[in-house]
Amino acid sequence: MYGPMAKWVAEIDDPARLPEFIARAFTTATSGRPGPVVLALPEDMLTQVVQTADAQPYAPMQAQPGGAQIDQFAALLTSAERPLVIVGGSGWSQPAREALQRFAETSGVPMAASFRTQDIFDNMHAAYIGDVGIGINPKLAQRVKQCDLLVVLGARLGEMTTSGYTLIDIPEPQMKLVHVYAGPEELGRVYRPTLGIVSGMAAISSALAGLPKPSVDRFKSWREGARADYLEWTKPTQNPGDVQMGEIVSWLAQRLPADAIVSNGAGNYTAWVHRFYRYRGWRTQLAPTSGSMGYGLPAAVAAKIVHPERIAVCFAGDGCLQMTMQEFGTACQAGANIVLVVVNNGMYGTIRMHQEREYPARKVGTDLHNPDFVAWAKSYGAAGFLVEKTEQFAPAFEAALKAGTPAVIEIRLDPEAINPRTTLSAIRQAASKA
């Protein structure tokens, strides 16, 4: 069962071999593209006693780019007129992030982030131009199609990064493609790169940061135009109802410190967070690239336990929250004083959106009979606040931070506000005419 999901699966039938298996497990899990390892322990083995020497601490192993590859990359960049970088995936660190920023400043290339990895690059930096994922800025999508050199660092070129494989031609991209990935299995899987490099992110970012600075900022207008598109895209939009989610998230982006941790699960409510919040600090975005509902709450609890000095805010839809809502009890028990923002529209919004788009007015099983989330929070001895108008959010949030306990802010969102770009009725009407 675990074989297709894990990097390595094994069963240990001799307890004397435990150090060998454990050493291999950690090395495998942390080297190349990081991933899970599963070791099965038979019950009859657990009671056996053996004397065996322990293994030495493991050390992750990462490939590094060759000098010839960096030279080829430099030549491709020199000949480009409209380059664009997409960063993402795992294996990043604060030093690698800093090196990547130096490369952006030296080269002048605009930087985008793949789905839910927006904290790899400072969103306030002049080179940052937005995220390439669900609900991508149409102008950014057009720039991806129009660029003549696409550099992908650490991200997979799957459905999310390519908008359902529509941004890049298969298998030969219309632009020159440099794809850097920690393992060779991803390079050329769908798209044939002009230059494929197997490398860890620390090594490639350091190498790119060391490239000489061009004498002329040739990409200035291309970069500044893309940045202007991003700034325009992140201005709050109006949605139906008395609560404006764009204004709330934009206010939070200005109110929260750069190291605040923002988590979320999966659902249409996340579109407001990804679009209007600006991630500035390293490891400030916790969000499932697999689209797992219920992820945000336990992620926020863990983050607050690890970093009690930092603010941890979790966004969760009413349906998303109820996948793991018992973990709020964990927060109360552990003294993890998170702020949980429940976006309550009374339905599974993403599924309802798909129903209206494909089968207009034929909703099935998407309405929710919700609890009173404020009363639910107070039943744990935590703080609870209700927001039914935009102007109520700021004082509720400030009170939540001062509560001295975990806190819940329930936002009652108009069901018509299905995402920042359209309404439920507009989707239904467009589908009925199709």
Image (spheres, helix red, strand yellow):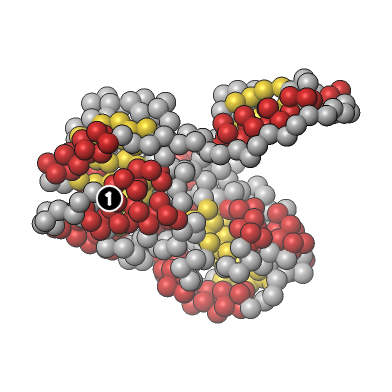
Is residue 43 shown left or right of residue 10?
right
Is residue 76 shown left or right of residue 390?
left
Q: Residue furthest top?
A: 13
User: What residue sits 28% from the left and 26% below the top?
Assistant: 192
Is residue 29 shown left or right of residue 227?
right
Q: Quadrant of residue 108?
A: bottom left
Q: Which residue is mark 1?
A: 210
Q: Quadrant of residue 354?
A: top left
User: What residue sits 73% from the left and 34% below the top?
Assistant: 54
- Residue 308 is situated, as x and y percent measured from the top left of the image, at 64, 66
Between residues 33 and 49, which one lies in front from this camera angle?
A: 49
Between residues 406 and 18, which one lies in front from this camera angle?
A: 18
- Residue 179 is situated, as x and y percent measured from the top left of the image, at 31, 35
Q: Is residue 15 above or below residue 425?
A: above
- Residue 410 is situated, as x and y percent measured from the top left of the image, at 60, 65
Kind of element beneath mark 1: loop
The amino acid sitting under disc 1 is: Gly
- Residue 300 is situated, as x and y percent measured from the top left of the image, at 61, 57
Q: Quadrant of the N terminus?
A: top right
The answer to whether any part of residue 122 appears in the image is yes
User: What residue sits 31% from the left and 45% below the top?
Assistant: 207
Disc 1 residue crowd, few under 14, some 14–19, many 20+, Cα 10 Å: few
Between residues 152 and 367, which one lies in front from this camera angle?
A: 152
Q: Is residue 201 above or below residue 63?
A: below
Q: Quadrant of the C terminus?
A: top left
The answer to whether any part of residue 136 appears in the image is no
User: What residue sits 77% from the left and 65% below the top?
Assistant: 380
Between residues 425 and 267, which one lies in front from this camera angle?
A: 267
Number of numbered discs: 1
Is residue 201 shown left or right of residue 336?
left
